[in-house]
Image: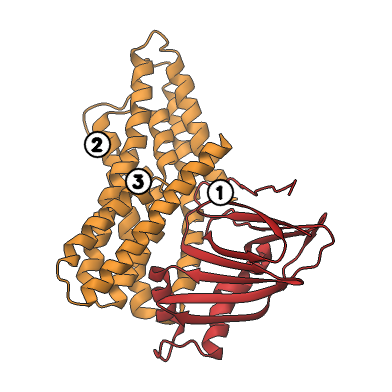
Amino acid sequence: MSELHHWFLSLIISWQQEINLVISNAFDELEAGEGGMFLYIILVAFIYGLVHALGPGHGKMVIASYFLARGSHIKDALNAAFLTAAIHAFSALFITMILFFFFQNSITHYFQTINQNMYKLSAIFIIFVALFLLFETLKHKNETETFPSKKGYDTNILKIAFSIGIVPCPGVMSIVLFAMILGYYTLGILSAISMSLGMGITMSLAAIIATKVKKTSLHSRYRKSLHVLSFIGIFLLLSLGVFILL
Amino acid sequence: MRYIFLLFLAPGLYAHPHFFINSNLKIEKNRVLSQWRFDKLNSKLLLFEFDTDKNKILDKKEQERFLQTHFYPLKTNNYNLFLQSDEEELSIQPKNTKVSYQNKEIILEFESSLDFKIQAVFCTIDATLYMAYTLEKFESIYEADIQKSQYDFCIGVTK
């Protein structure tokens, strides 16, 4: 298992390294007057988002644990994943802009510090969401249907997306900053949006799989396992929060 | 080489490579010469931050500021290196450290002492994956066995 994990991680990192090089070369060509590189960079940023989110982080486990605990509909799973990716990218965009305009002499140092602190903050939010879910699950323990009603918007999705998304995506930060240093502000912003769409697709997979697992158990003969799955999801969520915090 | 063990530390759940580093390593009689070449994209960001006079040359003062920010803090993790001389784990004491900017890359070079009787093991070790190390070039005066991946490597040398 460890070797498989190592192999997978190695593969993801090699792809990212390759894309990283493709992007910096594309910017070189753009600088040299190749106008077509503008769209090409946006497209590569999208692929970078898809691949980047496959690696550790980005809250895939958190989202999956949430949907395992809570259960929901595919639409909500997609909502949560894309909302998280959007907040993740927007947070990176916002912080990069602040650093670029006001802290040019300490950018990479602040990248590191901000990221570390945001992880801690995110961990605290995740713990709160887990505790809230635990409270709700215990409250509705005797009810057979644990899915949120189809009517209305599940505000917990916003909470969970915000909890994970506030950690700025370092990949987005690097690309946006690179573009801004070269004076391509619009391209930097468009690349961040494109990258967040790519990350959203990858993160959706985790959310959809968890939703499907929960749904399968709801319609199976083993409905009693629903509560067990909920508690497993909450336990995972809580453990992730504590693990990141410590 | 009988014993080479890779330190495949399970990277943290939130581990991300921030810097992709191509590493060149040269093992000589009593020292290891390390060269870390930062990826082009991050080199641009680092140059923007540390080349304050914007002449694309990192002078002594700019180099020192770079080292203070990105290299010296690694001391707590033995500069992301694991060095075992025979059975004893040694701490890395980098010497002749310098930083330069060449061919659009930030290059960090340093030496570390190497003293062993039979066998030494030299590996990268960064569970946070903040820096992903790819071994690009390797030279050694000793017989060597290498295990490497896209983000770490481990080398065993025998006299």
Identify which amino acid the numbered label 2 is placed on: Tyr
- The part of the image, by quadrant, that contains residue A157 is top left
Q: Would you name the residue on which mark 2 appears?
A: A153
Chain identifier for the orange-coloured part of the image: A
Chain for disc number 3: A
At horizontal 57% and vertical 45% (from top left) the residue drawn is A243
Chain identifier for the red-coloured part of the image: B
Q: Would you name the residue on which mark 1 appears?
A: B11
- Tell me residue B14's x, y (percent): 49, 50
At horizontal 58% and vertical 84% (from top left) the residue drawn is B64
- Tell me residue B33's x, y (percent): 65, 72
**Residue A184 visible, this angle:** no
Contact, mark 3 vs mark 1 (Cβ under 8 Å)? no
Number of residues whose C-alpha sits closer than 10 Å to that of mark 1, classed few (under 14), some (14–19) or many (20 or more): some
Q: Could you give the CA–CA distance between mark 2 and mark 3, rounded to whole angstroms?
A: 14 Å
Residue sitting nearer the eye, A137 or A63: A63
At horizontal 41% and vertical 29% (from top left) the residue drawn is A68
- What is the tally of numbered marks visible in this picture? 3
Q: Could you give the CA–CA distance between mark 3 and mark 1, rounded to whole angstroms?
A: 24 Å
Q: Would you name the residue on which mark 3 appears?
A: A161
